Image (tube, rainbow, N blue to C red):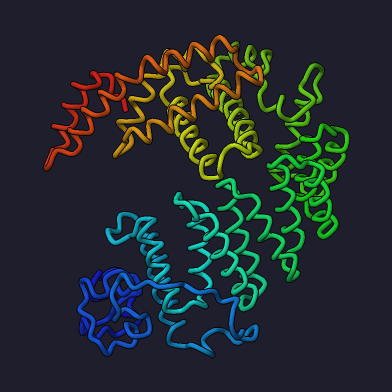
Amino acid sequence: MEKCTLCGRKKAPRDCPGLGGKLCSVCCGTQRQKAIKCPGDCEILKAAGKSRPEDAVGDVGDPAGGERVPRGAGFGAEQPDAWKAAEWDYSALVASGMIPGFSGAPGPKERAQELRRILASCPEFYPARLELGIHFLCIGREEGDGEEGRRTLMGGVRGLLEHGDKDEIAETLDNCCTNLENRFRFEESMELYRAMLDVGVDPAKAHDGIGYCLSYIGDLDGAAREIRLAVEAEPGKAVYLSNLAYTEMQRGNLEAAGDLLEKALGIDPKDPHARGNMQCLKAMRRKGGPRDWKSFLLKKPDRRTVERLEAAEDDDGLERLAKEHNKGLLMAFRMDLARRKDLTPAGKFDLMFSLERFAELAEREADEGAFELSDMITVSVGFKDLIDAFVVETSDVDRAILDEVYASVLEFYGFLAREGAVGKEDYDELVKEMAKARPGIEKRMDQYGQVRREPGITTERKAQARRKIYGAGIDWR
């Protein structure tokens, strides 16, 4: 197959009358009526509705209303041109986001506008409707985005259930649920899993997914009931037994968890989930070990293990131990966030995203390889340098982003102080250090921002300015 006349890279199945040559789907979707002068009689252009003004997006409608196309018939039987054009445009949109460094890749707002345009031309095209719903629920910050997101998402789900096959339904909804759960949208995720149950698609995965969501929002009894249904649906699958054991560990039922994990490892001795959960269970069963899940996540690394690794000069082992400790602290905080009623899902996600970025920097920039987030002295003393590093490594940092980082750190260490994982006096000292450091951080941030925005600045000139503002030590990054 010939290469695209415009980009010269991708295979081009279509003759483009505007170019007088072959065209790939990416260039057709992103460069139509831009680099390409499309004639008015182009069939793709007419089907996509591009002959009307760019801002005439209109109402995206809802495929749940009106006449249904029978399952298996496909939308092409009713609107072949509109569906084909929508599929072409959507493929181009997806592909443009997958090419590293592609200049035509749209940002979130531009992508949402393109999805709206596709749906205005073909309201039944459920892949775009699903993505747009996820966009509003997971990325949108404007008032009403949540309501519009749920309505749009469920419209896409209805289209998928009506016209998709079982494999497509299972894979698509599982991907949607993963996105929703990562963004603290557990209620919406459970709604999609229930839709899977309604049509009999992969009931074990659906029950397991509902159980996962319930465990995060604090309904551990409900979670156990759902995951038991998953085990009953597929009793020979180790992962569901392991997930049920994990839930029993959260409930404090260690004996029941042990029995389930032995069964799981009997089915698949190499299952990573079961093996990892068994290691956690052994730690909880040790004399003096934590008997509840939150205490297990928040506990300090075992002192005898630390001493053994130090005596062996096993720096890699010490670093792994510290990373596991930090992972537990972050997981405990995420679970606490999920159960709070005073924050929106978007607010929870922003806090967690900023905190994970801070934790990543703190682990990387620590002088010693084994750095623990609960080491309050190191965090307090090094806070200014960590935030300076964050500013230097993050483009277009402003005070709003700085506010998010400050809020995430304060929320995290406030949580650890309330749970007794760090001392309250140490937390109070950190709050003071953060407040004292802020004016200088903002001053340096503003100075470096001016350098970054200087037209035509060279890499060497930027490096010189960076050293002048932050000191020579900034060059270690």
Q: Foreground: 153 or 80?
A: 153
Vertical relation: 256 (above or below) 189: above
Quadrant housing residue 405:
top left
Question: For the point 77% across and 31% down, which residue is it?
Answer: 281
Question: For the point 36% across and 30% down, which residue is it?
Answer: 390
Q: Foreground: 470 or 347?
A: 347
Name, please, the residue furthest toward the front: 143
Q: Residue 174 at what x, y percent from top left?
A: 62, 59
Quadrant in the picture for the C terminus: top left
Question: For the point 26% across and 71% down, which residue is it?
Answer: 31
Vertical relation: 262 (above or below) 10: above
Question: For the point 80% across and 35% down, which residue is it?
Answer: 251
Quadrant in the picture for the N terminus: bottom left
Quadrant housing residue 303:
top right
Q: Residue 223 at what x, y percent from top left?
A: 77, 46
Name, please, the residue furthest toward the left: 456
Q: Residue 192 at what x, y percent from top left?
A: 66, 61
Vertical relation: 384 (above or below) 139: above
Q: Tell whether 75 sits left or right of 211.
A: left
Q: Residue 8 at what x, y percent from top left?
A: 25, 70
Quadrant housing residue 362:
top left
